[in-house]
Image (cartoon, rainbow, N blue to C red):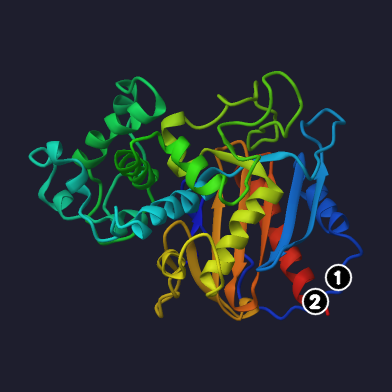
Amino acid sequence: MIIRIVGAISMAFFFASKAFSATPAPTLTSVLDPIRVKYNVPALAGAIFTTDKLIEMAAVGVRKAGTTIPVTTDDLWHLGSDTKMMTALLAGTYVVEKKLSWDDKVISYFPELAEKVPPAMKEITIRQVLWHQAGLSENLSLVSRFFLSGSPSQQRQMAVASILESPAYTPGTFHYANNDYILIGAILEKIGDKPWEDLMRERIFVPLHMDSAGFGGTGTVGQIDQPWPHFASGIPAPSNGPDTDNPAYMGPCGNVHLSMQDWAKFLIDQLRGGTGMKALLPNEIYEAMQPEAPASGDGYGFGWGVCTRDWAGGKALEHAGSNGMNYCVAWLAPGKKFGILVCCNQGGDTAAKACDEAAYAMIQRYLAKP
């Protein structure tokens, strides 16, 4: 099992161990565009990077189907569930300051709920929540969502009771859940005494110089000034802009957008920290986020799917994200100190296949270079 996180679990169909012998194409554009055409998605963008720098990137296609406005390498892309690794790193900033421990009991941050939650929920830890092993339901029910009010931060705090009082699984087994990271976001807000969005800006985006990073859907409403969201059918969404996205209370599990350059900055920091190099936080934080793949198969760290691949020289890290109208995927090869990212302004299986094929081609391209 390889963990493919887009609000669900799927399989990475081509990333079995293979030999790489393809001759590098003249440009990354010429690698991506035939794949975009093959799958008939509006746009694809991709980048290759190492522990030292972003070495190559390209964007092909159009911002909105039915127009001729091209995407650019400076455009903003929606990350969906790839936001989770950012929330995990934010938690790591408080572990460094000893204001949080991976083994803290979740209920210690919500003592007012201690008599209302099932006994098993009193024992779950921060680590289990980040691992998706806390037994939580995947998403809030429609009824629970109906009663949320106030700012996104206030809604997250209100959601905690529903999340903890209505577990869906036995703690200790893996069940991917957006609620895990909504819960973590609410805990970080309690510790930091600020909305998760402000904490992300102050502790992650600013230190890593991710100047383009923001929250919600991309673009100015009604203007084709950024990649427009498209449904799985390829049909453009009726609108664009910040509100064309998951509900804002879901920010910690899936609402960040940013440029390829800035996403690469974050991923380079992950690659550096996971290989013992100087990074934003001490190496032990990245070691917790990026554990070794279990002997029994693939696993999950904190916001990362973890597996073993020959092409990666051993451990590989993967995560994909989608809000249903965009799709993205990132792969890291710590043993070979490189990684790739791919973005598409369409959701669904076709976009996932296009991104997967682009990722495979980019990995081939990097490994074939002298």
- Measured in 3D between alpha carbons, the distance from the residue under mark 1 to the one under mark 2, in whole angstroms, is 6 Å
The residue tagged 2 is 368
Vertical side of 219 occupied by 291: above or below: below
Compare marks 1 and 2 and give the one earlier in the sequence. 1
Q: Position of residue 279 (x, y in %)?
A: 54, 64
- Residue 196 visible at all: yes
- Residue 165, located in which quarter of the rendered image? top left
The residue tagged 1 is 24
Residue shown at 52% from the left, 48% from the top: 204
Q: Determine crowd level at label 2: few under 14, some 14-19, many 20+ residues with C-alpha closer than 10 A.
A: few
- Callout 2 amino acid: Ala
Residue shown at 57% from the left, 45% from the top: 206
State the SS at label 2.
helix
Contact between labelled residues 2 and 1, with CB atoms less than 8 Å apart: yes
Q: Position of residue 246 (x, y in %)?
A: 50, 32
Q: Residue furthest left?
A: 115
The C terminus appears in which quarter of the rendering? Answer: bottom right
165 horizontally vs 342: left or right: left
Looking at the picture, tell me which residue is in the foreground, 43 or 107. 107
Looking at the picture, tell me which residue is in the foreground, 91 or 338. 91
- Callout 1 amino acid: Pro
Q: Position of residue 305 (x, y in %)?
A: 48, 63
Q: Position of residue 24 (x, y in %)?
A: 86, 70
29 horizontally vs 206: left or right: right
Question: How many numbered marks appear?
Answer: 2
Q: Determine crowd level at label 1: few under 14, some 14-19, many 20+ residues with C-alpha closer than 10 A.
A: some
Vertical side of 226 occupied by 260: above or below: below
70 horizontally vs 11: left or right: right
